Amino acid sequence: LIVRRNIFSREGASTLKLVRLSSITYDKSGQPEAWFQLGKAQAVSRRQRNEEIKLAMHSIRVIDIQPQSVLLEVDGQILELSMGQTIAERLHDADLEALPAES
């Protein structure tokens, strides 16, 4: 049995509104690092490829880091997060992209 999280629950959605891609840099060995602002206190979390962001209600893993964006797996859904964007904003954009075009 696979249980899927409801990312649109009141608590889940508010948590994802607070995770923002703030910077992409490179460490001493040249490996890219994605910097995320977490929460209202603006705590910062640096992550590299295949590392997870620990949130109580969500499973978030960094798949790849490009110069201006990061590919994430968020609760089983693959998203490309652009600089300055929150996960909630990207999920909203992905939902709009999935809607059928009006004729």
Image (cartoon, grey):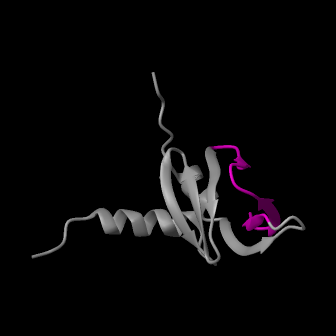
- Spot the residue most to the right: 28
Of the pair 10 and 82, the residue shown nearer to us: 82
Relative horizontal placement of residue 65, taking residue 41 as reference (left or right): left
Of the pair 98 and 64, the residue shown nearer to us: 64
Relative horizontal placement of residue 77, taking residue 47 as reference (left or right): left
**16 part of magenta stretch:** no
Q: Residue at x 90, y 68 (%)?
A: 28
* Residue numbers of the magenta segment: 31-57
Residue 56: image location, x then y, percent:
69, 43
Residue 65: image location, x then y, percent:
65, 65
Q: Residue at x 73, y 75 (%)?
A: 23
Residue 46: image location, x then y, percent:
80, 62
Q: How many marks?
A: 0
Residue 93: image location, x then y, percent:
42, 70
Relative horizontal placement of residue 96, taking residue 72 as reference (left or right): left
- Spot the residue most to the top: 1
Task: Give the vertical position of 10 relative to 65 (above or below).
Answer: above
Query: Quick one: quadrant of the C terminus?
Result: bottom left
Q: Residue at x 45, y 21 (%)?
A: 1
- Spot the residue most to the front: 29
**48 part of magenta stretch:** yes
Q: Residue at x 20, y 66 (%)?
A: 100
Task: Give the vertical position of 17 relative to 85 (above or below).
Answer: above
Of the pair 45 and 11, the residue shown nearer to us: 45
